[in-house]
Amino acid sequence: MFEKVLIANRGEIAVRVMRSLREMGIATVAVYSEADRQALHVRMADEAYCVGPAPSAESYLRADVILEVAKKSGAEAIHPGYGFLSENADFARACEAAGITFIGPRPYAIEAMGEKTRARQLMEKAGVPLVPGTKDAVEDVAEAQAIAESMGFPVLIKASAGGGGKGMRRVDEPTEFAQAFEGAKREALSAFGNGAVYVEKYVLQPRHVEIQVLADGQGNVVHLFERDCSVQRRHQKIIEETPCPVLKEETRQRMGQVACEAARAVDYVGAGTVEFLLDAQGDFYFLEMNTRLQVEHPITEMITGMDLVRWQVRIAAGERLDLSQDDITRRGAAVECRIYAEDPENNFMPSPGPLHVLKTPSGPGVREDGGVYEGGEVTVHYDPMIAKLITWGEDRQHAIERMRRALKEYVVGGIATNIAFHREVLDHPDFVSGDYSTDFVPRWLKERQKPVPKFELDAELVAVLSAHRREESLQQSAAVGPGGAKGAAGGSSRWKALGRMRALGR
């Protein structure tokens, strides 16, 4: 087993990885940008090294600098978390060349599943069901439109090297196709350095359901059931839950088997996620494979009792996966809400700034994976997610009730957050019933009325009354004579006036 591991990430995921490493008795090394000098993951680590200025391209994405730190610190392995270098095959290859273990899949698997058209080809060969679409990237707009028209609209134009909704366009009419095609290519080139796109049939009202897999270096692969990630805005997940409320048991078993087959097709090692679209008829189609730890992995941990980071480390150290599929059981249900420093009432604009107050929820069945602390600061330089709130319950209703309670306990002062927005979603009839798809949030936002803060009028009256009393106290204080006696205006004693002022916070 490793004695020291470097975490090539920041924020809540760096903190979460450190916690498992600490439980395993492994020393931790943090890297940080100049903007993150006082960050929580830096404070928690056994050692910390600055790797550059605030921009990610000059710090967290500097593979060469991070490898230098690993050598300097004596770290034997690097855990990449998610994002940044986690799905960078060149970085995984550079770690191997430097004699440092990359805690993740082999470079081949990262490349194979990172290139979406190549992944589709591999999955088709492995017998994994696919959404109808082109096998290869399409360069010519006229050819792409002809393919789209043969499939029938709506269609999706998707970046071959993409993810997270970047380089993706839905097209409902032929007249919209050319503009959407060129826009997707430009965005893909900007985001991924690769402007290749392909065309895929758009599945109406789909659910986004993914399967967690674990695989060791000896060919053993198991799945850890599914997560429903259909509550999304702009193709970004907001709330995840497990189990999927509409998935039939026979479909669940088949999806798990297919996910394991997909992992075997690329000799996968470590923790990975195979993502599917589930249509209204219960048919499912391969979407992509994420060759890293997912943001939403805690809900899987909550229902299985397994520590996925611990397993990542053990597998990377060469241990055999001593579990069969029958050994893995699930209990209850779990929900995760992503807590963002953003303002839902201002088009979800980021809300950076100091955290004057931070009171996190706790109690039975509640887990908070945070990356900030009271008195710290949320900067403008990185993703605005500051924490993940996870609840477990004996069933779906119990997990949701606990989440409602936990969200009410969550207090953040100094910045805007989406906590109240989460409470709205959890109370929406479509979510409560479990009858929702990936278009649930966009459709609801078009109809949503901006909520009126409770007790707003009462707060205004209290503010006016408080200001009036302060003014009255000041007048009384001015009327106090020397030595604390009453002044000519007949004011009260100086000590009483000062006491009132202190009580009023002056």
Image (spheres, grey):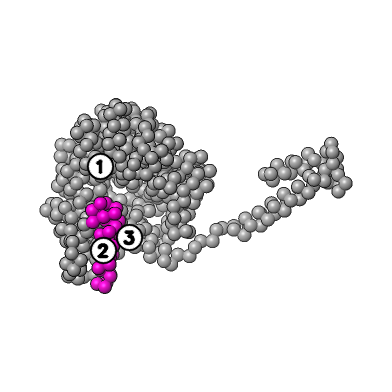
Q: Earlier in the sequence, mark 1 or mark 2?
A: 2
Asked if residue 342 is among those painted magenta in the image, a careful observer would answer no
Could you say whether the residue bearing mark 2 is in a helix, strand or loop?
helix
Disc number for residue 438 = 3
Residue corresponding to mark 2: 182
**Amino acid residing under circle 2:** Glu
Q: CA distance from mark 2 to mark 3?
A: 25 Å
Task: Give the foreground label among 1 and 2.
Answer: 2
Compare marks 2 and 3 and give the one earlier in the sequence. 2
Could you say which quadrant of the image residue 39 lies in? top left
Q: Is residue 263 visible?
A: no
Q: Residue at x 25, y 42 (%)?
A: 271
- Whole-percent x, y for residue 300 in the image: 31, 45
The answer to which of 178 and 406 lies nearer the viewer is 178
Visible residue check, residue 343: yes
Q: Name the residue: 41% across, 52% down.
A: 400
Q: Secondary structure at mark 1?
A: strand
Question: In the image, what residue occupies the spot 52% across and 47% down?
Answer: 414
Q: Quadrant of the N terminus?
A: top left
Query: What amino acid is at disc 1?
Result: Ala
Sequence order check: which comes first, mark 3 or mark 1? 1
The residue wearing badge 1 is: 271
The residue segment tinted magenta is 166-195
Of residues 491 and 35, the one nearer the viewer is 35
